[in-house]
């Protein structure tokens, strides 16, 4: 049981680690919902610069650009190349997603996600489906599709919109983990743990957009008490 923290710059990753985060999601550009960090940050977090390597499990957001998740062939080639590069740096895994739009219906790009997961797993990493999941027209069916694609976990903010839907998504996920995210703070942790969730995802950002270390420490302590 613990807190996964999404961080958006080099220093915050180390601060979140010191605050007791269970796991990190490494990103940049909070205003755009998170994109892939620059390679120099990834190398620093891997211990290939003047900074020590992160010592807790860390996953890298793989999102080549802001905007939608309907990717071109070039976008997909970039993602596959980054999977190779991240695998060499020794991170626990990647956070990725890809969608298709058919008329008004949005679905998972199952062919690409299956190909990506095979590569990710061959490199000894795990693959998390990010919050593109929240844009899907049929999220319950998508849980089963994600499982078939080889996704290890699904990150979703459905709890911030409808807790009953989140509860049903968890019920549908027989072979895959669901991790709630989106606006999770100390004040609402119990809403999720009462449903049986043992891992929660937060950015723990303050009003000025900085990492709120005090709040994060309180959340970590609260999750430990619930254990």
Image (cartoon, helix red, strand yellow):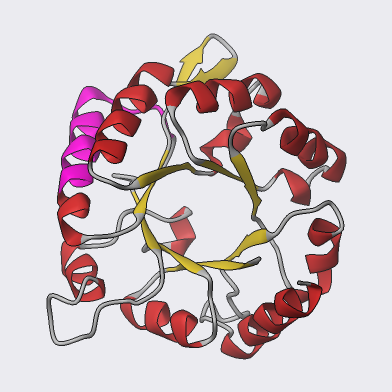
> Left or right: 25 with respect to 21?
left
Point out residue 112 in the picture as x, y percentages from the top left corner: 33, 23
Span shown in magenta: 69-84
Res 3 visible: yes
Q: Quadrant of the C terminus?
A: bottom right
Per the picture, the main secondary structure of the magenta-coloured stretch is helix
Picture layout, residue 117 above or below residue 82? above
Splitting the image into 4 quarters, where does residue 89 fall?
bottom left
Q: Nearer the viewer, residue 104 or 138?
A: 138
Indicate yes or no whether the magenta region holds residue 76: yes
Residue positioned 45% across, 54% down in the render: 32
Res 99 visible: no
> Left or right: 203 with respect to 92?
right
Indicate yes or no whether the magenta region holds residue 34: no
Residue positioned 14% across, 87% down in the render: 50
Q: Nearer the viewer, residue 5 or 107?
A: 5
Point out residue 40 in the picture as x, y percentages from the top left corner: 16, 69
> Left or right: 173 with respect to 189?
left
Residue furthest toward the top? 103
Q: Nearer the viewer, residue 23 or 111?
A: 23
Splitting the image into 4 quarters, where does residue 168 fall?
top right
Point out residue 155 in the picture as x, y percentages from the top left corner: 57, 46
Residue positioned 25% across, 34% down in the render: 119
Point out residue 10 in the picture as x, y percentages from the top left corner: 32, 77
């Amino acid at each position: 049981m613990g807190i996964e923290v999404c961080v958006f710059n080099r220093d915050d990753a180390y601060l979140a680690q010191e605050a007791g985060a269970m796991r990190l999601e490494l990103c940049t550009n909070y205003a755009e919902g998170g994109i892939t960090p620059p390679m120099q940050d990834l190398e620093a977090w891997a211990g290939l610069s003047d900074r020590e390597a992160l010592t807790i499990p860390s996953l890298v957001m793989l999102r080549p650009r802001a905007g939608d998740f309907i990717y071109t062939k070039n976008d997909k080639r970039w993602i596959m190349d980054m999977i190779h590069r991240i695998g060499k740096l020794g991170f626990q895994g990647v956070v990725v997603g890809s969608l298709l739009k058919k008329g008004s219906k949005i679905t998972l790009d199952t062919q690409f996600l299956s190909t990506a997961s095979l590569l990710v797993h061959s490199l000894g990493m795990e693959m998390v489906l990010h919050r593109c999941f929240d844009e899907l027209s049929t999220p319950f069916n998508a849980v089963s599709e994600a499982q078939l694609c080889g996704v290890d976990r699904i990150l979703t903010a459905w709890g911030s919109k409808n807790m009953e839907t989140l509860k049903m998504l968890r019920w549908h996920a027989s072979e895959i983990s669901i991790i709630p995210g989106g606006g999770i703070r100390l004040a609402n942790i119990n809403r999720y743990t009462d449903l049986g969730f043992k891992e929660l995802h937060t950015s723990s950002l303050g009003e000025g957009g900085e990492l709120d270390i005090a709040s994060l420490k309180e959340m970590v302590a609260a999750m430990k008490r619930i254990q």
